[in-house]
Amino acid sequence: MHSKKGSHTMVVTRFAPSPTGYLHIGGLRTALFSWLWARHNNGKFVLRIEDTDQSRNNEAAARAIVEAFEWVGLDHDGEIVYQSQRMEIYKMYIEQLLDEGKAYKCYMSKEELDALREAQSARKERPRYDGRYRDFTGAPPEGIDPVIRIKAPTEGTITVFDGIKGEVVFNVADILDDFIIARSDGTPTYNFVVAVDDALMGINEVIRGDDHFSNTPKQLVVYEALGFKTPVFYHVPMIHNADGKKLSKRDGATDVMAYKEMGYLPEALLNFLVRLGWSHGDQEIFSLEEMKALFNPADINKSASVYNIDKLDWLNAHYIKNMHNDDLAEHLKAYGADLEGHDKKEILLDALKERAKTLKSLAEMVNEVLSDPLEYDPKARKKALKADSKSILGAFVQMLEERDDLHLPSDYHGVMEEVVEAMEIGFGKIGMPLRLALMGKLSGPGVDTIMAVIGKDAALRRIRKLLATLD
RNA sequence: GGCCCCAUCAUCUAAUGGUUAGGAUUCCAGAUUUUCAUUCUGGCCAUAGGGGUUCGAAUCCCCUUGGGGUCACCA
């Protein structure tokens, strides 16, 4: 694969979730984009857990994220970086900024801050820190642990170069104040550590959600203060729910692992996600290799997209239909269908995989075929059973009993045809009641296929069971 | 509300300033299927509105409208 950036700089991207919960579908798409771009360029993709806020730190969530990555098959380079383990590094840079006079201690209490903001709001001004400790040299107030604020520019503009949006110019007066880079307990804040880590880890292409866009000027202030080289940014438009709002945990199936439970294939999910905000002509089906070869963040759309599960279902069905039966059988185990060693596995899966949208439903269908019906759907019964059904099924039973050379669906089909011809009836006359006997309902794969899969004895058993209810 | 971003079928999207505005999903109809599903064929459906620029605008500019994001000692 040739990369456009070629020989000079290795592309390094990252995914940096905060471990506040499971990995959701929007995060996965962003991660996929980052991963694809790194792999496209033979670069590196690193995973960093943003857990600087101990009060919200959650180890289980970090594990859940890793588990989701493993399921979909996105690998990362090097060890996972936990920001909670890098506090000394951040402290060092904060000290540096303090020494250089680029940051300062602010002794304003939360109450004072609140009051300030309230007053500003009342005056219809933008709530912002007023810089009262920026040049403070007096004796610090008693009993207050200071926060540390960075000296942000007070006038002029900051320009963000975004690979998707283009150049966006912010007016400093509209958006900035001396924001906090370290809390009163000494821990650093998000906008500071993101910039420090991205720089230190050599991240040169930041692909992240659009909700981070307005943080970018702040991070640029940190880059500037520390003299770090800035990366290229790509802010990926949000994924919206049907209401047009940012996809949130309230929207149901947003947990990536829920898709596994529902029976979706990772390849289908990734294919679905890569097409949200990105396309390559009219192509809809992309293997992972094709995605890697074709993806480029510069081609990402500017507008948000709405999450719609219909297309995912279609893709999932597509990947199921095209999967080898052995692989399918392996997947099916997790959904409660065990076909290990079943001699008619091929016939069964060939017949069923055409009709399944999910692995879960496929597993259910498998078990439905493999086990005798427990009951007969009343409506199906009424529709399938006519006055002559009993004699037709009886004749079929008789002919089955005489045969011991039945293996393939076509063998059973032959027997059915014999009955149809002998009795001079239409095919439906035997098909419908037979289907009811075998499945307990009127949908499913061909009855000849069902019989071939379960064998003569089981077929006879099921037919006799229905016949027994006809007296 | 301030700032920022966005705007093509219901949905995902395509279209060097020149196409009957294309494809996909959904939906509808027909064919195939003893059923259901699959598959195949066909059909419905879009450039938010208004001004410009231009021989020519979905495409460039402006305004309006609509939608979204963000404004913490969260990330």
Image (cartoon, coloured by chain):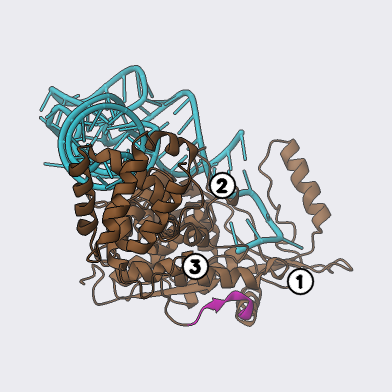
Q: Nearer the viewer, residue A354 or A24?
A: A354
Q: Residues within 10 Å of mark 1 (few under 14, many from 20)?
A: few
- Which of the two discs, 1 and 2, labels the residue nearer the N terminus? 1
The magenta segment:
A79-86
**Residue positioned 17% across, 43% down in the render:** A421
Chain painted brown: A
Q: Which mark is residue A251?
A: 2
Q: Which mark is residue A185?
A: 1
Viewer-side label of 1, 2? 2
User: Which amino acid is tagged 1?
Assistant: Asp
Gap in angstroms between the C-alphas marked 3 and 1? 33 Å
Q: Residues within 10 Å of mark 2 (few under 14, many from 20)?
A: some
Q: Quadrant of residue A360?
A: bottom left
Give the colour chain B carries in the figure. cyan
Rendered location of residue A43, percent (x, y)? 33, 75
Residue A80 highlighted magenta (yes or no):
yes
Q: Chain of mark 2?
A: A
Residue A330 visible in the current orientation: yes
Q: Are marks 3 and 1 on the same chain?
A: yes
Rendered location of residue B73, percent (x, y)? 71, 60
Q: Nearer the viewer, residue A290 or B62?
A: A290
**Residue positioned 69% across, 65% down in the render:** A56
Extreme right residue here? A142
Gap in angstroms between the C-alphas marked 3 and 2? 19 Å
